[in-house]
Image (cartoon, rainbow, N blue to C red):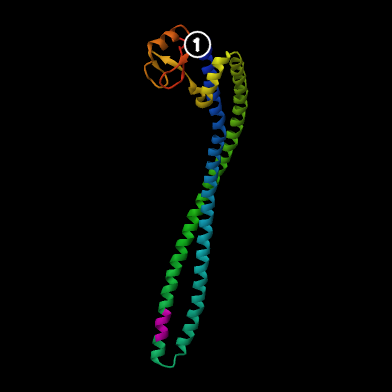
Amino acid sequence: MNVSDSVVRLLHLRLTQISELTNQIERGPKQISAAEVVVKTAKQSLQDCRDAIKQKKMEADRKQLQQREREVKLRDLAGKMNAAKNNREYQTLKEQIAADEKANSVLSDEIFEASEEVDALQSTVPGLEERVKLAEEEKAKMILAVEKRLESLHVDLKRVQSELAELECSLPSEFATEYKRLVGSRGMDALCPIDGNSCGGCYTNVTPRVLDRLRMGHPCPCPSCGRMLYRPEN
């Protein structure tokens, strides 16, 4: 396979560049998705807070209704107590009134606590709304930055792919067949520079015959892993 290691080195460089550019392009949508998650999380926190406020208000309203109903009942019991026909009936009504007044007192405390909780939750709403606003602004900035970056990356990728295609067209048929097979199964990992006396990919020492061919500038496969070996530039 009459191909110089400088050509293989350049092939590997272009394959590596394509891989790196492709990875950067793929990261763009992931960055936008991450920004969208931040916005979604901020919005969910705000909604959870609003739902908690609504729940607490409903709870307080329900207890206030119970309190009003019990107050009506207390007035009714007071009237009955005043009209009691005997001491036993009077005492029973008196005890009932005391129990309902105590229950109403507990309700008052619970209503007050619920009102305080509502106030505390409402005080956090502006901060949560600000978080949503900032997250949406950051998302918008991220989208613009990613779109601009992707435009540049696609231009670079197209250029490098064109350069690689031009190189591949100039390869001798025998080498091109082996090269395409390796790249098809390994991608940019199909080619690898020699590292001293060992393969730079699998780190296995290569035979003297392989080293001799490499020193003469003829790339050849690693006997161990099958990568196409070439001499590094220096």
Instruction: Report the magenta residues as a range.
Output: 92-97
- Residue that appears at 51% across and 53% down: 49
6 with respect to 102 (left or right): right
Q: Nearer the viewer, residue 136 or 126?
A: 136
Residue most extreme to the front: 174
**Is residue 116 positioned above or below 38 on the image?**
below
Residue most extreme to the bottom: 85
Q: Which residue is mark 1?
A: 5
Q: What secondary structure is found at the residue carrying circle 1?
A: helix
**Is residue 54 positioned above or below 170 on the image?**
below
Q: Amino acid at mark 1?
A: Asp
- Residue that appears at 42% across and 22% down: 225
Q: Nearer the viewer, residue 205 or 177?
A: 177
**Is residue 195 positioned above or below 49 on the image?**
above
Q: Classify mark 1: residues with Cα within 10 Å, few (<14), some (14-19) or many (20+).
A: many
Residue 17 magenta-highlighted: no
Task: Tell me the quarter of the image containing the C terminus.
Answer: top left
Residue 11 in the image: state x and y as whole percent: 54, 16
Q: How many marks?
A: 1
Residue 96 magenta-highlighted: yes
**Is residue 18 positioned above or below 69 on the image?**
above
Q: Nearer the viewer, residue 93 or 175?
A: 175
Magenta span: chief secondary structure: helix
- Residue that appears at 54% across and 52% down: 47
Residue 2 in the image: state x and y as whole percent: 53, 9
Residue 41 in the image: state x and y as whole percent: 52, 45
Residue most extreme to the top: 216
